[in-house]
């Protein structure tokens, strides 16, 4: 299926490659801790809506070029998903339990982070995983924000200390996920 016919839905999760120096460092640390000794994706986020507010996204889906994502970047913010990642490899997954009600619970659980600064200081905790698991104060890096969304939606029981490679492995390997898209976005 070409990208222009791909339909996304609120609550779809994604991982992307980050070619910058920080992305390469993140992948190196992830690969060092990874059970499969692989790490391809260095960023994660959630699809939260459509640029066209009149569209019934639960009935009709969201054309990929109109998808709006919520991500922990330098600030926690929304952006046009397609514009941000065109030309980059992207993994998009859909959880089988995601419903409109669960989406709304998940979004309500993370929306207060919108506009706040990225919790980059938490990245150091990933070098010593027990610290990342227990020292949070509610702040989250991109992959933790992804998992916090699913925690608040009532799908998973814990959100701290997940990195983008953990999220990508979950989308690839856990049976309650469907891979919707995994290739360079056109």
Image: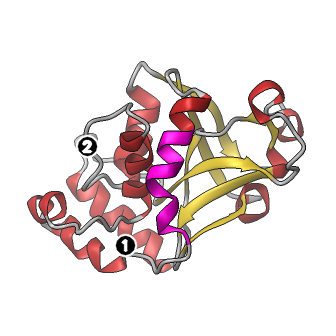
User: Residue 118 has which mark?
Assistant: none
Q: Considering depth in this image, is 79 or 53 the residue closer to the camera? A: 53
Q: Considering depth in this image, is 47 or 129 the residue closer to the camera? A: 47
Residue 118 sits in which quadrant? bottom left
Residue on which the image places disc 2: 158
Question: Where is the N terminus found, in terms of image quarters?
Answer: top right
Q: Earlier in the sequence, mark 2 or mark 1?
A: 1
Q: Could you tell me if the residues under marks 2 and 1 are in contact, i.e. CB atoms within 8 Å?
A: no
**Would residue 9 appear left or right of 145 to someone viewing this image?**
right
What x and y, as percent, mark residue 33? 21, 54
Region of the chain picked out in magenta, as a range: 104-114
**Would residue 132 appear left or right of 11 to someone viewing this image?**
left
As measured in the structure, the alpha-carbon distance from the residue carrying label 2 to the one carrying label 1 is 25 Å
From the viewer's perspective, is residue 54 above or below residue 75?
above
Residue 82 sits in which quadrant? bottom right
Crowd rating for badge 2 (residues with CA inside 10 Å; few <14, some 14–19, many 20+): some
Q: Considering depth in this image, is 80 or 32 the residue closer to the camera? A: 80
From the viewer's perspective, is residue 163 above or below residue 105?
below
What x and y, as percent, mark residue 124? 23, 75
């Amino acid at each position: 299926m070409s990208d222009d016919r791909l339909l996304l839905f609120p609550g779809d999760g994604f991982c992307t490659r980050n070619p910058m120096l920080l992305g390469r460092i993140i992948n190196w640390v992830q690969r060092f801790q990874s059970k499969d000794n692989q790490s391809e994706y260095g960023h994660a986020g959630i699809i939260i809506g459509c640029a066209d507010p009149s569209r019934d996204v639960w009935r009709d889906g969201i054309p990929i070029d109109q998808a709006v994502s919520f991500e922990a970047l330098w600030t926690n913010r929304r952006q046009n998903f397609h514009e941000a990642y065109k030309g980059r490899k992207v993994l998009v997954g859909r959880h089988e339990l995601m419903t409109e009600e669960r989406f709304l619970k998940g979004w309500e659980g993370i929306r207060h982070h919108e506009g706040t600064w990225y919790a980059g200081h938490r990245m150091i905790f990933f070098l010593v995983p027990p610290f990342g698991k227990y020292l949070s104060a509610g702040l989250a890096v991109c992959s933790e924000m992804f998992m916090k969304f699913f925690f608040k939606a009532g799908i998973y029981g814990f959100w701290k200390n997940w990195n983008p490679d953990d999220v990508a492995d979950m989308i690839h390997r856990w049976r309650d996920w469907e891979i919707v898209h995994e290739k360079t976005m056109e």
